[in-house]
Amino acid sequence: MSGPWLTRRTGLVATAPPATSLSTRSVLDEDARPSAPEPDQDVTYSPRGLAVGQHLIDVHNHYRAELEQVRDLLARVAKGITDAGEARGELNRLTIRANDWTLGGACQTQCVSLTEHHGTEDAAIFPHLRQSQDNLRHVLDQLDTEHHAIHDVLEEIDAALIHLVQHPADLGPVTEAIDLLTDTLLSHFAYEERELVGPLARHGFFPGQI
């Protein structure tokens, strides 16, 4: 696993996965997640490379903060402070929703100064990492699969909010959908940081960055 060597060799700390689940469902097969091996001992990390690796954690922290906003939004709907239609509008304005959970989308909005707009599309970052580090391909395949699963959960939330407009007293579906989103994102972020912080610190988001 990447976690044990990452901090020892880079000083960077991947965020731990959640200790408990909020939802009774899961859309992730956490036991099937592959892990890339530790790099050879002659691999070193520059200060710029370490900043790139840290930036992924920072982007995720932005999204974790937005996730708290989503949960606060549900609490306001439950208390009657915000109606379901307003909640839908607020959700769709968040970068959580707008970026469709692709790494490139995340970087396109949050990593402008660091990457200077080069290679920030998801279609470029993952191929760059695949080409730079062959033993990362199974991890990247898994992350791509999880991005699609997260998109489906976001669609569930939207459908649950539409249901709430039609049935204002029934908070069950939207509560379950947001609990599932919380579990899914926090687990996914932890896995992505564990596996990609080191490679990004080594190879960058795009060729020539480091």
Image (spheres, rainbow, N blue to C red):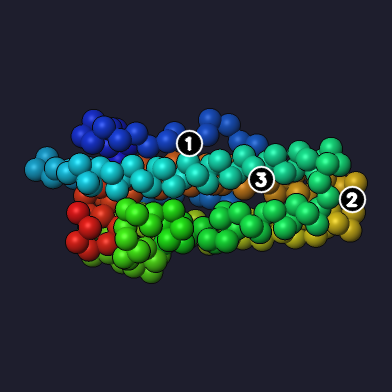
The amino acid type of the residue labelled 3 equals: Val
89 vs 131, left or right, is right
**How dense is the environment of label 1, judged by Cα within 10 Å: few (below 14), some, or many (20 and up)?**
some
Q: Residue 129 is drawn in which quadrant?
A: bottom left
Q: Residues within 10 Å of mark 3 (few under 14, many from 20)?
A: many
| Number of residue marks | 3
Say which quadrant the C terminus sits in: bottom left
- Quarter holding the N terminus? top left
Query: Residue 56's spot in the image, x, y percent?
Result: 38, 47
Q: Which residue in the rendered view is the most extreme toward the bottom?
A: 123
* Residue farthest to the front, as pictured: 113
Q: CA distance from mark 2 to mark 3?
A: 18 Å
Q: Mark 2 to mark 1: distance in Å?
A: 34 Å
Tell me which amino acid carries mark 2: Pro
Tell me the residue that label 3 is attached to.
Answer: 70
Q: In terms of sequence position, does the residue under pointer 1 or pointer 3 come before the other?
A: 1
* Residue that badge 2 annotates: 168
- Amino acid of disc 1: Pro
Q: Residues within 10 Å of mark 2 (few under 14, many from 20)?
A: some
Residue at 34% from the left image edge and 54% from the top image edge: 113
Q: Which mark is on residue 17? A: 1
Q: Nearer the viewer, residue 37 or 103?
A: 103
